[in-house]
Image (spheres, coloured by chain):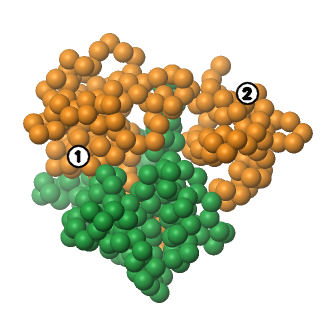
Chain colours: A orange, B green
Amino acid sequence: MKKQLSDKVINRLTLYHCILNDYINKNEEIISSGQIASLLKIDDSQVRKDINLLNNSGKSRVGYNVKELKKSIESTLGFEKHKRAYIIGAGNLGMALANYGNFANYGLNIVSLFDNDEKKIGKEINNKKILDVKELPRYVWQHYIDIAILTVPAQYAQTTADFLVNAGIKHIWNFTPVVLSVPYNVQVWNENLMGNFLQFTYDLN
Amino acid sequence: MKKQLSDKVINRLTLYHCILNDYINKNEEIISSGQIASLLKIDDSQVRKDINLLNNSGKSRVGYNVKELKKSIESTLGFEKHKRAYIIGAGNLGMALANYGNFANYGLNIVSLFDNDEKKIGKEINNKKILDVKELPRYVWQHYIDIAILTVPAQYAQTTADFLVNAGIKHIWNFTPVVLSVPYNVQVWNENLMGNFLQFTYDLN
């Protein structure tokens, strides 16, 4: 049965995973909860509690086995369950996400970008083609999950969302600073950068 | 005395604020908690509970006064307390953030961008100059808060962070997929896009 993990636990486990990648690059085989905790400036006990939620964490007397712990996070968070995604809007933000880290390692396969600018259509970014947005409905096949990553300018956000919904998209990762109005059976995940900033800086006021 | 608001409340209030901006653009004067709840697909009672945390929410028999509710969110979340920020790395992501929404309305003043690419230095993005990163230490003045928004490629993240810390930066908003190692008196806010994605899609696995 699948474990229920809170958003905060998922967030922290992803950060532990980043640290483990870094350790693997440095050929380190063992990591302690204290090393993870100190990089993230959180409590050692918090790290141990999170890792205890995983199956087969690779714990030994001297610490955690880096590769086993990494694999365990991957299987718990479902990195192997691939989701297909399209970036809608090949501006700076869309390009940045097309080039960003190794999304595919986390189960996010960015298949292509879509735009309506003829100067951009046909070009490639990080081996992903920029296609004419008019072609999108043809690309929304019968997959379990197709995600649209919305990176158009704010003034086109709602009309583009309407178009995506009509094309059959059921999941929108919304990077625009606009609250989208969509039918009940469509999920919007708001990236809400300003909300994150305000959370981070709230205690500084 | 300042109210303690949870991250989730701050996140939702920011989204309500987006909706209110949209209502103001449409010259709507009154909004109900039900209208907000339906756009965000959350419970009406949740919206009312959040708004009750604000001072002077502009509530009347017919609903909330849009402008008063907006002002109340702004004063509660401290939009008027301006913070100075620099974008470090004028690539696609840095450019996207320099152009993004109206950060200044939320108290985030992006003063300039910094890069080490001579082809970029001297150019302007959205009225913000791209400066030579070597000049950064001169720009970190005696302000209460100076924030570095880190958007360099992953392989330069740690060395750039070291440089920022030496320049006197105490707050880093980290958009790179790298966990940074910084001294105890420096705060790192990880944007952690992959963590957000995994939270959003966790229930789809």
Report if residue B39 is visible in the image.
no
Q: Secondary structure at mark 2?
A: loop
Q: Is residue A68 above or below residue A155?
A: above
| Proximity of marks 2 and 1: CB atoms separated by less than 8 Å | no
Say whether residue A191 is left or right of residue A47. Answer: left
- Dot 1 amino acid type: Gly
Q: Quarter-wise, where is residue B187 in the image?
A: bottom right
Q: Nearer the viewer, residue A6 or A105?
A: A105
Where is residue B105? Give x, y as percent.
Answer: 29, 68
Looking at the image, which residue sits at the far front? B118
Q: Nearer the viewer, residue B45 or A175?
A: A175
Say whether residue A170 is left or right of residue B67. Answer: right
Within 10 angstroms of label 1, few (less than 14), some, or many (20 or more) residues? some
Looking at the image, which residue sits at the far bottom? B142
Within 10 angstroms of label 2, few (less than 14), some, or many (20 or more) residues? few
| Chain under disc 2 | A
What quarter of the picture does the N terminus of chain A occupy? top right
Taking the spot 51% from the left edge, 32% from the top edge, the residue there is A106
Where is residue A185? Give x, y as percent.
Answer: 33, 25
Where is residue A199? Give x, y as percent.
Answer: 48, 60
Q: Quarter-wise, where is residue B28 in the image?
A: bottom left
- Dot 2 amino acid type: Asn
Where is residue A153? Give x, y as percent.
Answer: 20, 49
Give the residue pinned by disc 1: A91
Say whether residue A118 is left or right of residue A90. Answer: left
Q: Which mark is residue B49?
A: none
Looking at the image, tell me whether mark 2 or mark 1 is earlier in sequence order: 2
Taking the spot 72% from the left edge, 47% from the top edge, the residue there is A47
Q: Is residue A77 above or below residue B166?
A: above
Give the residue pinned by disc 2: A55
Taking the spot 73% from the left edge, 43% from the top edge, the residue there is A28
